[in-house]
Image: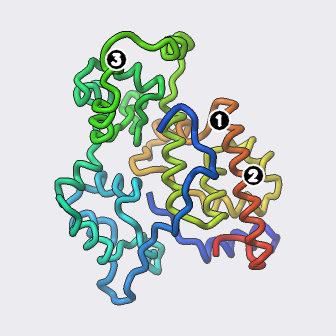
Amino acid sequence: MDVATQVLSEVRGQVPPVGPVGTVIPAISAIPVAEPSVVRADPLPDAAVGGARAAEELGLTRPEFARAVQLGIVRAGPPAQGGAVRYARAELERIRSAEGFPDALRERVETVAGAEAAGAVLGISPGRFTRLARCGHIIPVGYRINRYRAVVWLYLAAELREFADREPGMLRGSASPADRELLAAQADLRPRKWRGRHVGLLLRRTADPWERAAVLASVLPEEELRRAVPDAAERIVLAALAPPPPYGHPQIPAAAAVALRLLRAQPADEVHWYRTSLDFALTGARGQSKSTGERGPT
């Protein structure tokens, strides 16, 4: 058995599946690393439930529940023996006991799709909303690909209302000089802003250096990743630990190809940022491997 195969075998045996703002993306050192957002469940058989049951007990639809997990509102517990993500009943009770449940919870995960619906929340035209979003003032929380293979961005309704309260001047009047410059260059910061948000949320869900490195590696184009990580065995580890596509990622090949482009950094400066961040994360991951004698999460 060669080194790469051995590493992959070891990683598959020890790694549980990973469940599913501003113009400048924050440096990796600025993204807080708390204790992993995992609730240690009681070993009793009924101490944890699957995602469908957890969503039902919280009064959420599956998309709403997936959004709550993505945002860190609901924290996953240890996976079942077969690898399925489980949710501790103690965690569900914590959420149910929060003030305003269940309406407050639903408000936190409510999303609207597209410029027309989002503009309606803000009381502005779809065109003005699109301008604000393209210039990076409003950041999507997700996406879907419609039947015409066009990207439809999703926005948190609560964030839109907060934006209206915080930036009333942006909802009327002419665009700022900076925005006019971006629009003249046909810039669209929505994919980049969404990637930054998505990566940040994933990084907050783990403190393990190899898993954090895998999150950053998953955003790099393949050729750039090979240059950043020349060791094939390390690339296998990172691939095994890579997070799955976000909830709602299409399964139809033509639509999936469109969505896949959203998952990869594109502008040169964005690629450089993730490459630098990956180098930093790998330094810590390799240091862990030297101290434990194992390559992969501990």
Q: Of helix, strand and loop, which one carries label 3?
A: helix
- Return the x and y of residue 137 as percentages of the image width and height: 43, 28
10 Å crowding of disc 2: few (<14), some (14-19), many (20+): some
Q: CA distance from mark 3 to mark 1?
A: 26 Å
Pick the residue in front: 257 or 76.
Answer: 76
The correct choice, above or below, for 50 with respect to 100 in the image is below
**Does residue 258 appear in the picture of this structure?**
no
Mark 3, residue position: 128
Looking at the image, which residue is at 49% across and 47% down? 198
Looking at the image, which residue is at 35% across and 59% down? 73
- Return the x and y of residue 286 as percentages of the image width and height: 77, 65
Identify the image quadrant of the N terminus. Answer: bottom right
Q: Are marks 2 and 1 in contact (CB under 8 Å)?
A: no
- Return the x and y of residue 43 as percentages of the image width and height: 39, 88
Mark 2, residue position: 279
Q: CA distance from mark 2 to mark 1?
A: 14 Å
Q: Earlier in the sequence, mark 2 or mark 1?
A: 1
Amino acid of disc 2: Asp
- Return the x and y of residue 20 as percentages of the image width and height: 44, 57
Residue 283 falls left or right of residue 68 = right
Q: Residue furthest bottom?
A: 44
